[in-house]
Amino acid sequence: RKEVEQDPGPFNVPEGATVAFNCTYSNSASQSFFWYRQDCRKEPKLLMSVYSSGNEDGRFTAQLNRASQYISLLIRDSKLSDSATYLCVVNRGATNKLIFGTGTLLAVQP
Amino acid sequence: DTGVSQDPRHKITKRGQNVTFRCDPISEHNRLYWYRQTLGQGPEFLTYFQNEAQLEKSRLLSDRFSAERPKGSFSTLEIQRTEQGDSAMYLCASSELGGDSSNYGYTFGSGTRLTVV
């Protein structure tokens, strides 16, 4: 079983839709949590950190449930430019080593 | 350029040849990481340096792989006797060591795409 599990998708949604991605992690010692975005054949880029209180950045909202070891990302009013792979990432702590999920592919359709 | 630089961007090599990749991290970042990514998978951790010290190596890093970071600045990743299974994107990333380092995300380089034929 992978340490970080995500539904690989693809999620095909129309422009303007709201879409949610979920992720679970198995190591309860994980300390920090992130969502990264990766465009085709490009490097991953940090989208947002995820905090226990939940946090929002424009159309993007991230939530963390430590008890359930569950992380989510909500994208409202999807744009064509949101089409990418979204990677769920956890940090084990002292070494700042990041563990990546396999990613969820989002395709926003016109 | 203040980002993470990797060289070369692409490398095609014949099976059995040795290859070396270079990574120049963000200058004030003292942590440097190498990851490997294959199609349809997320990046997989290979190794990690804090300054010049290699502090952790993944079991994925067979004895054909070696990484160095002399003087705590740039890093090199060498693969000896390449195999077709080594074909992947090799990503370098750097991060800060700060008071709350566990919350820092990485900055990745553009990667080196290796194809072993």
Image (tube, coloured by chain):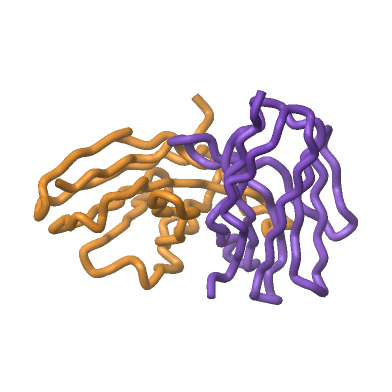
Chain colours: A purple, B orange
Q: Quadrant of the C terminus of chain A?
A: top right
The number of discs equals: 0
Judged left or right of residue A6, residue B43 is left
- The x and y percentages for residue B91 are 42, 46
- The x and y percentages for residue B84 are 19, 55
Above or below, A99 against A13 in this view is below
From the viewer's side, name the closer residue of B6 and A76: A76
Residue appearing at x 26%, y 55% in the figure: B86
- The x and y percentages for residue A101 are 57, 58
Residue appearing at x 64%, y 54% in the figure: A88
Above or below, A46 against A15 in this view is below
- The x and y percentages for residue A49 are 74, 49
Above or below, B59 against B6 in this view is below
Judged left or right of residue A73, residue A9 is left
Residue appearing at x 68%, y 69% in the figure: A30
Q: Quadrant of residue A18?
A: top right
From the viewer's side, name the closer residue of B72 and A5: A5
Q: Quadrant of residue A8?
A: bottom right
Judged left or right of residue A78, residue B117 is left
Residue appearing at x 68%, y 40% in the figure: A47
